Each structure stands twice: as C-alpha cells, then as structure tokens.
Image (cartoon, helix red, strand yellow):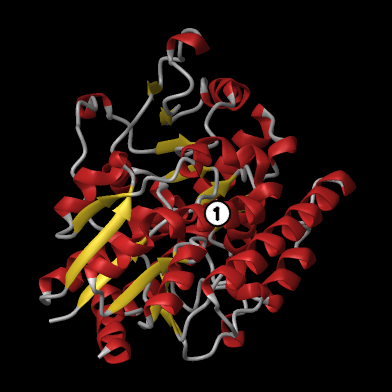
C-alpha cells in the first residue's frame, strides 16, 4: 500500500478533525507518518499513524498567535522556512507516495513540490475563496481597525519576501501568492457538508466535502454526571484557545442563575473555577468537560464558534449561540445564523441579558432545533472519512 506524510498545524482544532481520516487510511493499509508536537503524540498514535516531532521553535509561538492574527502570513512563512531547513531531508528519507497538508501549513505544499509527490489539502475550517470573503463582508465581518489592516499588509509583504527567497533557494517555479501562504491542491478534503459551506457552488470538484469527523474521543472522565437532573441543559464554552475571558463566565452566572435549567460551564485551563467566585446552584463549572458526551445531553450550546465545536453541536442536532472571538469564528457564526440553526452574538455586545434572551429563544422557538437537524442530516449524508479516503486513493495512485 501507499505511504503518506501528514504535515499538520499542531493545534487541537486542526488535528482533531483529521484523526478519523488517518484512522481510515491506516485501516486500509496505508502507512501514515504524522508530524506534530508532543502534546498530540498519544492521539496520533491511537489513530494508527506514526508520530514524528516538529523541531521548529516558531511552532512554540502558536499559543500566543490568536492575539496577533494579523501576523499570520509572515509567521507561516517563517515557519515554512525553518521547517524546510530542519525537516526536508527527513521528509525525503520517509519516501512518501503522497503528502496531506493542513490548509494553513504551507510547508506541506512546498515539501510536495520538492519531493515531486501529490499533495492533498486538509481543511478544518470552511473552504475559502473570493466569494466566501464577499459573504463575510456582506455579513459585517471586517478588520477591527485601519491599524490592523496596515499591519496585515506589512506582514503579507514580509511573507512574500520570505517566499521569494525560498523559491530562489529551492529553485521552485509556478507557486503563486496563494500557494505561498494558503495552499489549495488538486484534492482538498473539507470537513463539513456542502450545505453548511458558504458559497458551496463556487467550489469545483477539487473540493471534497466529507462532513465533520465526529468520533468518540477517549477523555479522562471524572465529570459528575449524577448531578444532571434537569431536562434542560445549557452548555457554555469558549474552546481551547480564546478562553481567558472571565467576564464572559461571570455574565453566564448572572444570565442563568435564576433560570429553570442546568448549566455546564467549561472555563478551559486559563481560568480557574475558584477565581470566578461561588457558582450559582444550577451550575457545574469545570476547567474541562468531555464535550461530545455533554453535547449528547445538551439542549443549547453557547460557544465561541470554533468550527469543530459548532460542527459537533450541530451533528448532535443542538442549536448554538455563537459568541465569536476571532474573524474565522465570526464567519461560522454568521453561517449558523444564515441557516437558522442558531444565533450570533458579537463579543463586544455580550451582556447577561442578551445571553439569557438568546438562549431563551433557542429553547422556545422550535425552528432553531429544526434547522439544526437539517444541518445534521447534511453531515450524515456527506459521506464521511470513507468517501474522503476513496478520493485520496483515486487521486494518489
């Protein structure tokens, strides 16, 4: 069978969606060598892949990058230069038949060019193009300020200079600006459905929409399930990166403390339950919860709008209130609202009253649950990782 290199961005939201696909490919006999960082070694090994560590020091900056997203383009190209310098001969020694690269890991596209093997792009967000950008602008998603726009332009210029030097160093031709920064391939696996993807008709058959890969995750589970006695469960979480907003958690306390529901609040690793003070009696506050198990029981999910979290919620037919923390999440939130599967609440507009009113609407107005069910049906009909693996086999053999 064939051998693949999987070159990912070592963040939860990029690695988790890919693991079911890796498991499917490994189950068919392909050998998958997966590059990431040590935090993901166990997950990767459990998927059937061989783990390899990146040595890049730039990747250590990833946790702080959300505060500096305008620097993303130059960060990615600095990282590409470093990874190619450190790992290219190791990639070559693996003798892969094909490469799967994350859509924001341009070093995978470069490695494919240099090794002369097919490249498949793994897209853990919505697929992006001009039409999707116009959709975002039409729905009010714009840069925060002129200063941010200027900074972004400067970082793109730096990225292009790095890219030009890499093209000279490695004698690569026919790799334009898009290929430098955010590569698409002749096969792009997108972990959502065409129904949920904005402007889906603008993407040709190079884009394979498989639906989300929602599989059971082995998580340490000391969650107090016995405390869940109320039929209405509101789950709230800001995810794994943008979760240091204690004002949001206190707004949840105020919003739902007197409501006839059970609230599960996940604060993440950056905010302790103790720092928030005493929780209302109808709250369970934890730094981490087994999200899939919670969503199987939840009635409403208040979320930051990460693609994985929203997909997992809608996969279970649970409508969402999206409180985005960055533009990518705002796009997800606007699409949810566009399809009627939930509500969008801008971060700067969050108050206890608006949180309570938004959740109450999702509880009372059955159309939101009906629309969430339609998204769920589209996910189930998309073909899943089996269809993605079929496409990869056809493309790479």
Q: Is residue 80 above or below residue 291?
A: below
Judge by depth and name the residue closer to the eye, 336 or 51: 51
> Where's residue 62, x and y in %?
51, 41
Splitting the image into 4 quarters, where does residue 225 fall? top left
Tally the numbered discs: 1
| Relative image position of residue 243 (x, y in whole percent) | 52, 31
Q: Is residue 190 above or below residue 257?
A: below
Q: Residue at x 28, y 82 (%)?
A: 387
Judge left or right: residue 57 versus residue 336.
Answer: left
Query: Where 200 falls versus 349 (above or below)?
Result: below
**Most extreme residue toward the right, as rendered?**
146
Q: What residue is pinned by disc 1?
A: 365
Report x, y in % for residue 38.
29, 40
Between 107 and 189, which is closer to the camera in this rendering?
A: 107
Position of residue 188 in the picture relative to residue 364 (left or right):
left
Q: Left or right of 274: which side holds 132? A: right
């Amino acid at each position: 069978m064939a051998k693949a290199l999987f070159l990912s961005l070592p963040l939860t939201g990029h690695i988790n969606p890919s693991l079911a696909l890796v498991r499917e490919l490994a189950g068919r006999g392909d050998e998958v060598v997966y590059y990431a960082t040590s935090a993901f070694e166990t997950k990767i090994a459990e998927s059937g892949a061989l783990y390899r560590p990146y040595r890049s020091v730039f990747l250590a900056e990833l946790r702080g990058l959300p505060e500096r997203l305008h620097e993303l383009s130059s960060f990615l190209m600095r990282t590409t230069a470093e990874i190619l310098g450190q790992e290219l001969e190791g990639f070559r020694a693996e003798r892969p038949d094909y490469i799967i690269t994350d859509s924001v890991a341009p070093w995978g596209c470069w490695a494919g060019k240099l090794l002369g093997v097919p490249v498949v792009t793994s897209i853990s967000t919505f697929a992006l193009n001009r039409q999707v950008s116009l959709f975002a602008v039409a729905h009010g998603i714009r840069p925060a300020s002129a200063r941010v726009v200027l900074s972004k332009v400067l970082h793109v210029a730096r990225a292009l200079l790095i890219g030009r030097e890499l093209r000279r160093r490695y004698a690569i031709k026919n790799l334009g600006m898009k290929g430098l920064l955010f590569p698409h391939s002749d096969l792009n696996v997108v972990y959502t459905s065409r129904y949920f993807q904005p402007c889906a008709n603008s993407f040709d058959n190079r884009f394979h929409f498989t639906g989300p890969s929602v599989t059971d995750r082995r998580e340490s589970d000391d969650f107090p399930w016995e405390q869940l006695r109320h039929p209405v469960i509101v789950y709230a979480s800001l995810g794994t990166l943008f979760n240091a907003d204690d004002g949001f958690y206190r707004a949840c306390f105020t919003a739902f403390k007197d409501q006839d529901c059970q609230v599960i609040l996940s604060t993440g690793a950056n905010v302790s339950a103790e720092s928030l003070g005493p929780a209302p009696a109808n709250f369970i506050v934890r730094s981490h919860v087994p999200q899939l198990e919670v969503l199987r029981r939840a009635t409403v999910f208040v979320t930051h709008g990460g693609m994985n979290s929203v997909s997992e919620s809608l996969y279970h037919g649970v409508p969402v209130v999206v409180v985005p923390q960055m533009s990518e999440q705002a796009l997800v939130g606007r699409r949810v609202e566009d399809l009627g599967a939930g509500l969008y609440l801008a971060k700067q507009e969050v108050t206890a009253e608006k949180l309570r009113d938004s959740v109450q609407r999702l509880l009372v107005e059955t159309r939101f649950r009906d629309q969430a069910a339609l998204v769920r049906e589209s996910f189930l009909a998309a073909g899943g990782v089996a269809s993605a693996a079929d496409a990869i086999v056809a493309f790479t053999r």
